[in-house]
Amino acid sequence: MTGPQGGAQTLEAVIDAMRGKEAEVGDRLCTRLADRIPSYRAVPGELVEEAWSRHFRRALTVLRDGSVPAPEDIDEADVARDRVTRGVPLGDGLRAFRGALGAIRDLFISEATHRGLDPLLMVERTKALWQLADTESLQIASVHRQAEVDAALWDARRRADFLRGLLYGAHSAAEINSGAAIYGLDPQRRYQAIRAVPRGGLGLDRSERVLETLCRAHGRTAMLAVLDGTIAGVTESRPVIGELEFTAGLGPPTHLGEVHRSFLTAGRMLDAARAYDRTGVYDLGDLSWRAAVLGEPELSAVLVARYLTPLEAEGAFGELIEESVRLYLETGRHIADVSRSLHIHVNTVRYRLRRFEELTGARLDSPDTTVEISWALAARELRTSGSA
C-alpha cells in the first residue's frame, strides 16, 4: 500500500492530470448541456465555461484538501441572478451543476485508477466530492430562489412604475408604446381606467389579483397594480364582480395616450361611490349628477336647508315625509307605487306630499324643483353615510 507521502504525491499527480484535461472535458460538457437542457441555449457559451471553470477549481481544492467549504463561502448569487434573468428554471440549473460534478468525479476516478492512487484515499476524496455536490446544490437552490424573488419584486416595481406613469400622464408616446409591448397592451385599442378598493376581508394585494383576473375574463386585456393605497389600472371593459365586495370607479374608454384623463374620472367615481357607501363598479352613467353633489358642498347645504331642514320641526313625521318624497321621485312620481312600497293608503301618500309642499313652499310638479329636491336628498344620503 502506498504510504502517506506517496499517496499525497500520487494525488497531486492526479490533480495535475485533471487540470490538463479541464478544457477538453468542459467542451464536451457544454455541448451536451445545450442538447439536453434546452433552457441553457439562452446562456452564452462563455458564461457556461466560466461557471465550469469555477466549479472545476473548487472541486480540485476539495480533492487536494479533503474538506468541503462552508455554504457561506460558496458564492453563486451572480450566476443565479443571471440564470433567472435568462429564464433558466432552478431544476435545470441543478441538473447542469450535478452534470458538471459528475464529469469531474468521473475524471478523478479515471486518473486516480490510472495512476494507482490508494483506493481508500480515492473513496475518501470521492465522498468529499459528493459532499461538495450536496452543499453547493443547497446553496445554489437558496440563492436561485432568492434571485427569483428579487426578480419578481423588481418586475412588479417596474410594472407599477409604468402603470403609474401611464395613469398620471407622465409617459411620452415612445414610452407608452414600449411599455405596452412589454405588458401586452395594444396601443390601437381603447381602455378604461379603473380605480378600486376592497370592502371585504381580502387585502390589497390579493384583491388586486382577483380584480385583474375578473378584468381579464373572456380574453380581455387588463393591467392593474396597487398604487397609492388603491387598486388602479386599465381594462378593456367593465369587470363583472358578482358578489365580491369591491367599490370601483370606472373612467370612459380612451386610447392609452389619453388614459390619464379617464383615470381622473375613475377617481371621482370611486370617491362618489364610496361617499354613497355603495358596493360595485360605477361609471359616470351610473352616478350621473350624483357625482357632482360630492364636489358642491355649498350648493348642497343651500338645497338641504331649503327642502329638508323644514321637515325637522315635524319630528318623526318629518322623516316619514322625507321617505315618501324620496320614493315619489325615485318611482317617477307614481303615487300608487309609493303606496305599495310603504304599505300605506294612497291618500296617506298624498297627504304627506301635500304637507311637504306646505312646509317648504315647493311644488312637486316643477321640473326644476324635483331636480333640486333630488340633489338635497343625495346630499342627505352623503351625510347619512358619514361623508362630508
Image (spheres, grey):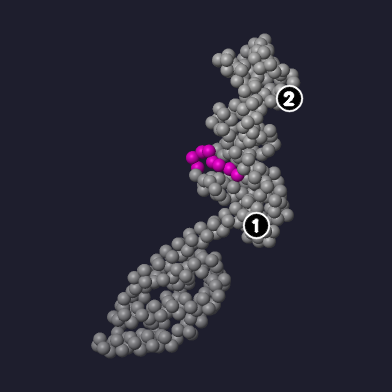
Please determine whether, in this image, residue 169 is positioned above or below residue 346.
below
Q: Is residue 275 left or right of residue 115?
A: right
Q: Residue at x 58, y 43 (%)?
A: 196
Neighbourhood count class around disc 2 (C-alpha, 10 Å): few under 14, some 14–19, many 20 upward: few
Which image quarter holds the N terminus? bottom left
Q: Is residue 263 magenta?
A: no
Q: Where is residue 262 drawn, in percent x and y?
A: 67, 46
Q: x%, y% of residue 310? A: 61, 18
Left or right relative to 130: residue 247: right
The crowding category of the residue bearing disc 1, from other C-alpha atoms within 10 Å (few below 14, some 14 to 19, many at least 20), is some
Whether 197 is among the magenta residues is yes
Q: Is residue 368 left or right of residue 76?
A: right
Q: Position of residue 296 (x, y in %)?
A: 64, 33
Task: Provide the residue span drawn in magenta.
Answer: 195-202
Q: 51 above or below 16?
A: above
> Which residue is labeled 1 in the image?
171
